[in-house]
Amino acid sequence: MSAGQANRFGFVINPSRLIDYDTSDRKVREYITLREPSFTLCFACGGCAATCTAGQHTSFNLRRMNTYIRRGEIEPLREEVTRCMLCGKCLLVCPRGVNTRNVVSLAAEAIRKLERNEL
Amino acid sequence: MKSTQLHIMVAGGGVAGMEAAGTLAEMGYRVTLVEKGDEPGGHLLQWHALFPDRRPAEEVRSYLRKRIEHRNISIITKTTVEKIRHHISGLEVNLSGGTSEKADAVIVSTGFDLFDASRKEEYGYGIYDNVITSAELEVMFNRGRVAKADGTVPSRIGLIHCVGSRDEKVNNNHCSKVCCVTAVKQAIEIRKMLPSCEVFCFYMDMRMYGPYYEELYRESQEFYNVNFIRGKVSEASVNINNRLVIKVEDTLAGRPLKMELDIMVLMAGMEMAASGMKLAEASGMKRGINRFLETTDHHYGNNLSGIKGVFYAGTCTAPMNITDTISHARAAVAETVRYLNGR
Amino acid sequence: MNSELFTLPFNLGLYFILIYSVVRSTVWFRDLSRPDKLRLQRGFFGKPFMDSLREIFSESLLHRKIFSKNPVLGYMHMSLAFGWFLLIVFGTIEADFFSEKHLNPPSHAIFFRWFNPEHGAEGFARIFSFWMDLLLAFILSGLLLAIIKRFIPRMMGMKKTTKHTWTDRIALISLWLIFPSRLLAESFTCGAYGSGSFLTGNLGNALASFLPAAEMAPWFWWLYSLSLGTFFILLPVSRYFHIPVELFLIFMRNSGITTGDRHSSYTEVQTHACSSCGVCISVCQMSSAAGIHDIQSAYFIKGLRNDRDIAAITANCLMCGRCEEVCPVGIELGPMRLIERRQGERSDRIMKLPEKYSLSRKRGSTEKILTQAYGYLVREEPERADVLFFAGCMTHLTPSVIVAMKKIMDSAGVRYRFMDENGGVCCGRPLMLAGRDREARELINHNSDMIWKSGAQILVTSCPICYKVFRESYYLEARVMHHSEFINLLIEEGSLRLGYLHKKVVYHDPCELGRGSGIFEEPRAVISYVAELQTSSQESNMSLCCGGSLGNLTLSSGKRAMIAADAARTLTLGSPDELITACPLCKKTFAQVAETKVSDIAELVAAALPAPRAAKAKTRPPRRAARAVSNG
């Protein structure tokens, strides 16, 4: 169905609002999971985002980043991922023992590689 | 052998131990109930009201007290079971103080310890005055007054779920099962006692698994205006006005949240009791995941220790509510009788 | 017996390695930075040269350091290095003394017995022969130990020994063959001519009794020459290259050259100076407590030397510095790994040519992010204060440390401002440990600005990680103090009234504070002032890492807990009442696994403060803390 057709019903779903799980690109997720298996342990408690030093100043949010990567939604992370200061507080808070610092580093690395078509 | 000549030791006089002892006595067995405190009753002794119906804890306490008022039961208090050994004529049970007794079977019902909340240092228990545990709040309910350390009335209270549960940082990966519903129950009680006090529950997942639990949750929203925020509190501090400040992510809003509180209640989880752990170590009883006693099968052997004549009842095997503990104790009695009859 | 053809392999090898060494040294020298070149030139004509000779004698020949750590291993290295050295020296003297001509080619001394088969029958020559045999026996005893070490490392007190590449293996075999073949070659010659001393003479006689000694001898002289030649030729591509390179390293280090923050000739020299002795493996907690046996410094350096992909090895290290502490060659292993971590990031950014010159938007956006990651930080106007307290990110998760510090400073009447009370900006050290110095610099600039503006004379921090970076990478007017130093200062100047706690405690040196910053004494002085301080088997410069280190980028929480449990066990062997540390990260890591109560040094001191009511009744002590520091 084209956007024009959808328009006839009086509404459009903005493509950026939709997580299209069938077409989303989960290469970043695979890249991280392979190198840091604890990435998959997150149960989204938000402890990391609560304690985050960078998160007090900016929209950087590790819990949300984790979810986005799992869903293959990389676009919102491009700007955000480098804002982490790697201070390691989240590492001490995480109740699931996710190696959070490594996840952030790998995410930044994966996104850089994705941009260069090396992934 | 006639049941009246058989002697069964019950290690631990909490809910499970009392129910097991009462049931066995009723069936004609001679029972010795060993309790480490001043009187049997366990954690229930300090509880004010019970979920999900908020009935007075006293009702269940008096049921259990009546249960062990039986001529077949002798009660030894201020004593712990140190070791269970196999002997030619059955089992020998060593008690603290150096004495020992012979028994034909032993039911281990050493129960749980409440998680020591000072181990989550970032929550400030033992550091800040107005950080208390759910058990301490229950004592306040018993006294009929919920107040800050300086005696003033709180205007906002936060209940923090999963303290010492589901947290690998304190080596407890398990869910303690009862804290979610306890928090909701306590939130309602606070709201009833102090209608002008706001109450917030900080949860990771609401695990309302039992009958009437979900209804209680619903009631707390519908009639008591309890607020629920999904996020794990990462740390607490005290600001210049001597109010607690907590940091949490409101994960549903996707943004970090800061909140001032007058009292922070930590919903302390269940851990294998230290006394039970010592007994297990001395007697060669296996401990499984999260240090609770390992039974021979999770489905159909969950009272069996794998040691001849030794059976498990209650929260020494896993976190349980009172209903399940009583059922588990009765099942342990059934296994014990089956063993004695089959000898 | 005058065919000299068999000396050819030896001569080829020798001249090859001599020429190679000269060329390689020249290249290294050329690649040095200007200041380092100057240092080296100045060093050559000054005290460093003599110091280096002394060090070469005691370390490269005698192996004094290895000797003190492990006498058997030390003897092995000494007998091979010093023994061979003496053999060459005395061989040369012998050849020079007893030959018709002086200034003979080296082969003449090495194969002296071949050219002078009847030498050493009587008089002074006889004594000399005896001495030469003794040296050979000395070397052979070391060789025996080396062979044992290779096959049964535990017998030498070593947990693990390093794995070899194939060039290493051939070089090793040729090295092992040198001395036995010399022994047999000399013995056969001696047996044929009835000469030789206690070793070669007796063995020669014995062999000659049932073998045709004169016919056998040339074969072994050939083998001897071949082994030497092979060894020399393989030297630059094997781990034995460390033998000549270490001399170069010692001289460079004594001239004042340090590793710095990028690859240079010096890192290259250090890479080749590693003998893969494996001492670093024995002390590594990753190996002893967490069962990870392939990331230790010896493997890291080997990977670097052989140009392997060592990104995983580079990242998987606690950076605790224990290996550097015991490295007999003195390689700066920590800085070397950090350089490699930075290198990792750089190589990641290397762009293919078409990309580099294309005007793709994506590349532009990456660059933008990379050049300023923390542009969002808001610069505030700080209040002025004499003493600035920076708790550090981690300390916010150990509020008892903050509460204790507040109590202590209030009690001493210190006028301070709590810089990161409502959460601050990271100090930058964690980024540096991850090899991201450029981003770290942004945070450093931000914090520096705040600290300068506050006008503080002292910056107190509770976190050793912050402390190290404040001291080393910030340009500050304020004196940087860890809280253990600051408390010590308050005690020394009499601002703190403290009681004595009747407790036995043991102290754990945090890596970044102890080995990392050299603060060993102050915490011990403070603790001894308020409690009984126990010692432990692993202390000060050899203290253990708690396992929580931010220096490791990939270690799992389970492995960290294993290291922590092992370290806590060692520390609490004396059953102390409390395990004291001076780092929030160590505290949290130990608290997870230790049976003993874990406290920070500040908590211990706060517990020794008089009860608050009593303190209030007294007049506050004068505010001396800031004054004392303006003088110091």
Image: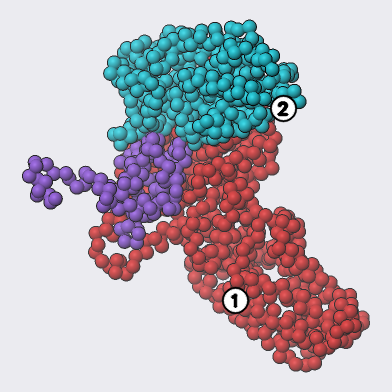
* Residue bearing mark 1: C21
Q: Residue at x 74, y 57 (%)?
A: C155
Q: Chain of mark 1?
A: C
Determine the CA span between mark 2 and mark 1: 77 Å
Give me the chain that's red: C
Q: Residue at x 34, y 23 (%)?
A: B214
The one nearer the camera, C371 or C56, is C371
**Chain that bears disc 2:** B
Q: Judge from the rendering whether residue C475 lies leftward or rightward of residue B86; answer left or right.
A: left
- In this rendering, the answer to whether C528 lies above or below C188 is above
Front: mark 2 or 1: 2
Question: Which of the 4 quarters of the picture holds residue B317?
Answer: top right
The chain displayed cyan equals B
Q: Which mark is residue B86?
A: 2
What secondary structure is found at the residue carrying circle 1?
Answer: helix
Which residue in the rendered view is the most extreme toward the bottom?
Answer: C2
**Residue under the image location 52 percent in, 30 percent down:** B300
Residue B78 horizontal/vertical position (percent): 65, 14
In the depicted view, which residue is nearer to us: B36 or B234? B36
Of B313 and B177, nearer the camera is B313
Name the quarter where the C terminus of chain C is drawn. Answer: top right
Where, by quadrant of the figure, is residue B293 drawn?
A: top right
Chain letter for the purple part: A
Q: Secondary structure at mark 2?
A: strand
C478 to the left or right of C574? left
**Disc assigned to residue B109:** none
What residue type is disc 2 on? His
Q: Residues within 10 Å of mark 2 (few under 14, many from 20)?
A: some
- Residues tagged 2 and 1 counted as in contact (Cβ below 8 A): no
